[in-house]
Image (tube, grey):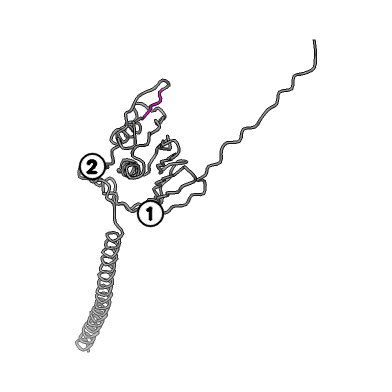
Amino acid sequence: MSSEPTVIDTVQITPPRDPFARAQPTDYLWVLLRPVYKARQLIHSERLVRIAVTNQKAGKLELLRLEALTEGEATVSEGNRIEVLVDHGTQRLRFGPSNLQIVPPRRGLGGFMLAHSVDWCHRTCPEYIVTPILLPGAEGTDTAEARDKLFRRAGFDIQPLDGGKVRAQVGRAGDLVSSWDMQRVELLEMADLLRRLREQESETLKTQASNNTLKAQIEQLRRTDMGSRFAIGCLITLAIFQALLLLWVVLR
C-alpha cells in the first residue's frame, strides 16, 4: 500500500467580470417630491431630485439603471438605485438589487423609479420572463411592509419563504404594472423645469429688490432719527442755557 501523500489540485475561481462596471449615465430625469403634511403640520418640505438613467448594451446583455442623486442624505451601498438586467439571448430579465433602499423614504420616490423601470420593460421586452427576486426578511417592520406594498403595486406576487426571506415573482415583463403615486411625485419635463427655475429666479429677484427697498427705508429712518435726536438735544441745551441766563438776570 503506497504511503505517498495525495496531492489535490486547487483551482481558484475568478468571479466573472461585470460588463457594466464602468457604465455612465446616458440621461437624467427630474422629479418633484411634493410636501408631506401630518395633522396640518409640515413634515417634509417640497424637494427636487435628479435621477441618473443608465442604459447600455454589452453583447446580448442590456442594463437599465436608475439612481436617485440626493444631496445631504446618507445612503447604503447600492442604495438609491433600481436596476434591470436583460439577457436577450435567453429572453429573461432580472430586477435588482435585492436590498432595495431608497432615500428619502416614504416620499414615493421608489415607486416612481420602479414604475419607470417597468415602463421601459414594456417597451423593450414585454415577452421576456422575469426572474424571481429573493428579498431579505424583515417581517413586521415598517420598511418591509412598505417594500412589499411597492412590489405588489408593480404586479409582483409576494411569497414568504423559510428562513424569514421573501420571494417576489411575476410571469412576464408584460404582466407588470407601471404606476406610481402622482400625488406625491411629479415628473418634470425640461421645459416645465426651466419654467419653474425662471419663476423661482423671478421670485428671488423680487424678494431681493423688496429687501433692498426695506434696507433703504430703514437706513433713511435711522438717519432721520439721528437728526431728530440731534435737534432735540440742541433744543434742550438751548432751553437750559436760557433758564440759567434768566436765573442769572433775576439774581443780578
**Label 2 crowding class (10 Å Cα cut-off): few <14, some 14-19, many 20+?**
few
Could you say whether the residue bearing mark 2 is in a helix, strand or loop?
strand
Residue appearing at x 23%, y 45% in the figure: 37
User: Residue 94's image quarter?
Assistant: top left
Whether residue 212 is situated above or below residue 237 in the rendered picture: above
Labels 2 and 1: the sequence-earlier one: 1
The region drawn magenta spans 164-168
Q: How many marks?
A: 2
Q: Amino acid at mark 2?
A: Lys
Q: Quadrant of the N terminus?
A: top right
* Closer-to-camera residue (19/71): 19
Does residue 178 appear to the left or right of 83 in the view shown?
left
Q: Confirm whether the magenta stretch covers residue 245.
A: no
Q: Which residue is mark 1?
A: 28
Residue 41, x across and y down, in percent: 23, 45
Residue situated furthest top in the rendering: 1
Describe the element under mark 1 as helix, strand or loop: strand
* Front residue (pair 33, 63): 63
* Up/down of 246 relative to 101, above or below: below
Residue 226 percent coordinates (x, y): 27, 77
For the residue marked with disc 1, what is the amino acid?
Tyr
Q: Which residue is mark 2?
A: 38
What is the magenta segment's predominant secondary structure? strand
The residue at 26%/46% (across/down) is 184
Q: Are there few (<14), some (14-19), or many (20+) residues within 10 Å of tag 1?
A: few
Q: Position of residue 63 (x, y in %)?
A: 44, 44
Determine the residue positioned at 39% across, 48% down.
68
Residue 131 spot, x, y in % from top left: 40, 32
Q: With respect to residue 54, does 177 lie above or below? A: above
